[in-house]
Image: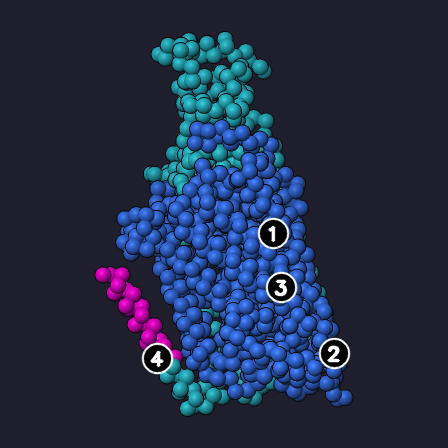
Chain colours: A cyan, B blue
Amino acid sequence: MKEFLLVALGALVFVVIFQIAKASEYVNVLKGEEKSRRQNNKINAFLLLGLLIFGLIGAWYCNELYYGKTLFKYGSSSVEGEGWDWMFMLTTVVTGIVFVITQVLLFWFSFKYQEKDNTKAYYFAHSTKLELIWTTIPAIVLCILVAFGLKYWFKVTGDAPKDAIVVEVTGHQFGWEFRYPGPDKVLGKKNFKLSKGINSLGVDFEDPASLDDIHVSGTMHIPVGIPVKMVINAQDVIHDVGLPHFRLKMDAVPGIPTTQWFTPKYTTDEMKNITGNPNFTYEISCDQMCGKGHFSMRGVIIVESMAAYKQWLATQKPEYFTVYPDRAPHAADTTAKANVVAAVVPDKK
Amino acid sequence: MSSVATLHGGDVHAAHDAHHEHHHHETFITKYVFSQDHKMIAKQFLVTGMIWAIIGGLFSVIFRLQLGYPESTFPILEDFLGHWAKGGKLQPEFYYALVTMHGTILVFFVLTAGLSGTFANFLIPLQIGARDMASPMLNMLSYWFFFTASIIMFSSLFVQTGPASGGWTIYPPLSALGDASEGSKIGMDLWLVSMAMFIVSSLLGGLNYISTILNLRTKGMSMTRLPLTIWALFFTAVLGVLSFPVLLSGAILLLFDRNLGTSFFLSDIYINGKILPNEGGSAILFQHLFWFLGHPEVYIILLPAMGMSSEIISVNSRKPIFGYMAMVGSLFAIAILAFLVWAHHMFVTGLNPFLGSVFVLLTLLIAVPSAIKVFNWLTTLWRGSIRFTPGMLFAIGFVSLFISGGLTGIFLGNSALDLHLHDTYFVIAHFHIVMGVASFFGMFAGIYHWFPKMFGRYLNNTMAYIHFWVTIVGAYLIFWPMHYEGLAGMPRRYYDYSSWESFKQFGGLNEFISFVAMIVFAVQLLFVFNFFYSMFKGRKVTTQNPWGSNTLEWTTPINPGHGNWPGEIPEVYRGAYDYAKDGHEFIPQNVPVGDDETHH
């Protein structure tokens, strides 16, 4: 019923507009076409000027409303992301100036040079000097932006610092898996053909490096202040590890591992204080269309102090023991577990 | 009719026209359906494009309902969509199908076929002084291949597993594996076959446009006297002819991967508990093939709008377009650069950073010719005597949107910034403004400006002004705030944001955007109504050249027949932009140069 009323209302508005449109056409004929054309011209010229003024006010108002919601005022949560924020501000200032100048000229000229009785258009077909000016200036400004941009680009896409913690991230429909290399700091080999049941990542347990690897789903723990290098994979279709708070993003492509690295600046708890939001969470969003559950492919990153991170790591059971529970030591005996791992896995360093 | 191409010299004309009178009996079928008249084919493209635009626009309204009101149900949706909207709530799979079809329809069927197909067909022969296209037969086939593509794409909406739903960019493996998504079953095959037909249509049309412009210009119409519309349509056709075949190859390889067990794009896949045998393929290879078309495609959409806006701004400012040669040169530069920037869509695929840096440089270079065009449009307005016809308003709107959307391209083209903004609402805002809405504005400008030539009647002005004002204000209200969502990292193609701590704060904004989108869509229906009403009942055109324009199409009769000019084709003596010259308000191209004229 509600829909029917809405449709009826819409139709009514249509009919009214149509009748007004028809009537105004007759009025124009009565008034004389030339006269009504000039009247229309004046109205539209004023409206264009109004569009400019209200548009600029609207852009400012929109910024007031939504800038706070972007969390930009708190800055990037990664050390490298500060460079991103700076680059973004630089580009915003440059394009902002161009935006205001060109839009003001566009609408101001439209208003000022509307058809008038006593003025004629001025013949002005070209000017090499002017054209050279507005070819060179944009070219120079763009070179500056490219130079700053590429400097940042090469930094963040370059090799991760040597002391970085390595975490393997794997995307699948529709969730995230994380693998930590364990005490030997080497991730065991994988082969997608070994994927089966609980060993969904296809870890090759023939490789001794895999025996102490830790596998967790959904939530990733990392320490604050230390670079983290993600080695990124996908199992089925292309996914993307989107880290909005750290200003990063990298595709997860089946068969082609990718990497990205960053240094978290604040722990999750610190961010809760900074933003005043007790529910604040660092989230991993899948940013590449991956099927019907794409929108729910959420991962969580918990950034914590080194001590808390180490404590968390110590409570994790190596995947090897999950896949082969019969080979696991007694669960309660944590020191024994560490010893078993140390015995099975010779330290490669 | 296929002999038109050879009938261009003066004497042969009379014979040709006589031939016309005696033997060319037109039936309903040959006049309106299998027509070989470029003007009728243009109208066929336009009407088909408009039908698709309504469908594609309606899809966006439906999925905006879900985005704006994720908590509500709309029982009416279930009445129309059945199990796709169980309980009045759009299902995620169908949401993605709608998003995919919205993109496919608007990018290819409306803004490529509907825009280029309409105006290249309509304007090229009329503005260069030709009786028809170089090959009217191929031209007709071009439309019918498009029609076939349309039918196949439309039928994919009704298959049980639904239409393609992997996004209009159809990245494999998602699009290659039926196991990955319902939409990747039969719907995807139909999508690929439809696109193959579409590409054939586009090639037939493009080759025809190029050969017509190069070979059939009337006496005196040198390349440097061509109106800018023709230059833009020429470069558009060149882009299409050189880039569409690459997508065709990608589509065929994808069909092989889907149906014949090849591994061009597939490797190392474990899905639904199954290990697939494919090894050695590269999912990224497809993206290279896709974007090698995909980026030129953006300019295939944009260049005609630029050309038509240039023409309309000059005519209605009563001033020559400023810097004609620079305008042609910048179109040329954009066309060349369009082929060299495709990988800027792939900055986050793990591409070699050095390769990325080359694409950054080339991408941002495009801003230079774009800036030249903007400044030249502004200078054309400066000290003009501007008449705000609806066409002119849309052309001014085009420039405004092109500036707004073009500038955000400077953010996204810089790979460093793309690292955060890629695939967020910032991208949605950018390309909808610069390529979607701006090109639509160019298209509307063209329709309002050339409607009197197409149908011998005017569109209703009041409805036209309402259409313009609601659309431009609405477009900015919809897309401007999306930049902020993108800045927060809000990903595109999400069915629901309410469980995301980082994005749910934009719920109110999404509702606002959806509300405005519905109003803007309703106003487009007003335009469609105005279009069909005025076609039959509009005020009749009584003067041959209602806008006081210099170009040749206005030297034809008010309702030109097949062959365009009843007598000889006019000869051309000057460029298309002699407005306000030597005290004359305008001097059409077919007026000989007087002794007293100055040379600029």
| x 28%, y 64%: residue | A6
Q: Which residue is mark 4?
A: A19
Q: Foreground: A170 or B236?
A: B236
Left or right, B291 with respect to B509, comes to right
Q: Sequence-wise, which precedes: disc 2 or disc 3?
A: 2
Specify start and end residues of the magenta stretch as a single range.
A1-21
Badge 4 density bin: few <14, some 14–19, many ≥20, Cα 10 Å: few
Q: Secondary structure at mark 1?
A: helix
Question: Could you say which quadrant of the image residue A253 lies in?
Answer: top right
Question: What's the residue type where badge 2 is placed?
Answer: Gly
* Disc 1 crowd, CA 10 A, few/some/many (<14, 14-19, 20+): many
Residue drawn at 49 percent across, 58 percent down: B150
Question: Which residue is identified by label 1?
Answer: B293
Q: Which mark is residue B138?
A: 3
- Residue A3, percent from left and from top: 27, 61
Q: Nearer the viewer, residue B512 or A251?
A: A251
Mark 4 → mark 1, Cα distance in angstroms: 46 Å
**How far apart are labels 3 and 4 at the CA level?**
43 Å
Picture disc at residue B9: 2
Tell me the chain of label 2. B
Q: CA distance from mark 2 to mark 1?
A: 39 Å
Q: CA distance from mark 1 to mark 3?
A: 23 Å
| Chain letter belonging to callout 3 | B
- Tell me how far mark 2 sits from mark 4, CA to CA: 51 Å
What kind of residue is marked 1?
Leu
Q: Say what secondary structure mark 3 lies in.
A: helix
Mark 2 vs mark 3: same chain? Answer: yes
- As for residue A18 lying within the magenta part, the answer is yes
In front: label 3 or label 4:
3
Label 2 sits on a secondary structure element that is: loop
Q: Nearer the viewer, mark 2 or mark 1?
A: 2
